Image (cartoon, helix red, strand yellow):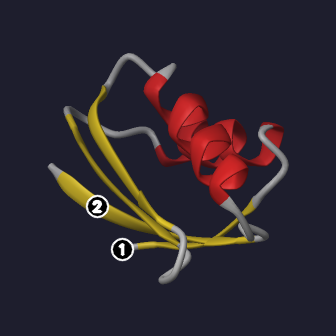
Amino acid sequence: MKKTILIEGMSCGHCVKAVEEALKELDEIKSVNVNLEEKKADIEGDSLDYNKIKEAIDEAGYRVVEIK
């Protein structure tokens, strides 16, 4: 399953790394590609739990705008 997460608050390379690391800690996520310019993360994984994804990004200091 592939999803795109729109993220608010990313402004630099450190932000990208923080979001990538937060998402990679979730077992169900197999791949992560964070795009700073478009303020989004493309993820792929099995049976994605949107609450866990949102919580991981929130804990990293950013806000999920939408998961589509």
Where residue 27 appears, as percent x and y from the top left, is 38, 16
Look at the picture and state if 28 lies above or below 48. Answer: above
Q: Is residue 18 left or right of residue 40?
A: right
The residue that label 2 is drawn on is 3
Q: Could you say which disc has been placed on residue 15 in the image? A: none
Q: Assign a secondary structure to mark 1.
A: loop
Q: Is residue 1 left or right of residue 11?
A: left
Where residue 21 appears, as percent x and y from the top left, is 56, 30
Q: In the image, what residue occupies the spot 32% across and 24% down? A: 28
Q: In the image, what residue occupies the spot 61% across and 45% down? A: 19
Residue 60's image quarter? top right
Where residue 56 appears, as percent x and y from the top left, is 66, 36
Q: Please identify the residue farthest to the front as the structure is shown.
A: 13
- Of residues 25 and 20, the one drawn nearer to the viewer in this rendering: 20
Question: What kind of residue is marked 1?
Answer: Lys
Q: Assign a secondary structure to mark 2.
A: strand
- Of residues 41 and 13, the one drawn nearer to the viewer in this rendering: 13
- Say few, some or many: other residues with alpha carbon within 10 Å of mark 1 (under 14 / 14 to 19 / 20 or more): few
Look at the picture and state if 48 lies above or below 67. Answer: above
- Number of numbered discs present? 2
Question: What kind of residue is marked 2?
Answer: Lys
- Of residues 6 and 46, the one drawn nearer to the viewer in this rendering: 6
Look at the picture and state if 46 lies above or below 66. Answer: above
Q: In the image, what residue occupies the spot 15% across and 49% down? A: 1
Q: In the image, what residue occupies the spot 51% across and 40% down? A: 20
The residue that label 1 is drawn on is 68
Q: Is residue 47 left or right of residue 5?
A: left
Upstream in the sequence, badge 2 or badge 1? 2
- Say few, some or many: other residues with alpha carbon within 10 Å of mark 2 (under 14 / 14 to 19 / 20 or more): some
> Contact, CB < 8 Å: mark 2 with mark 1?
yes
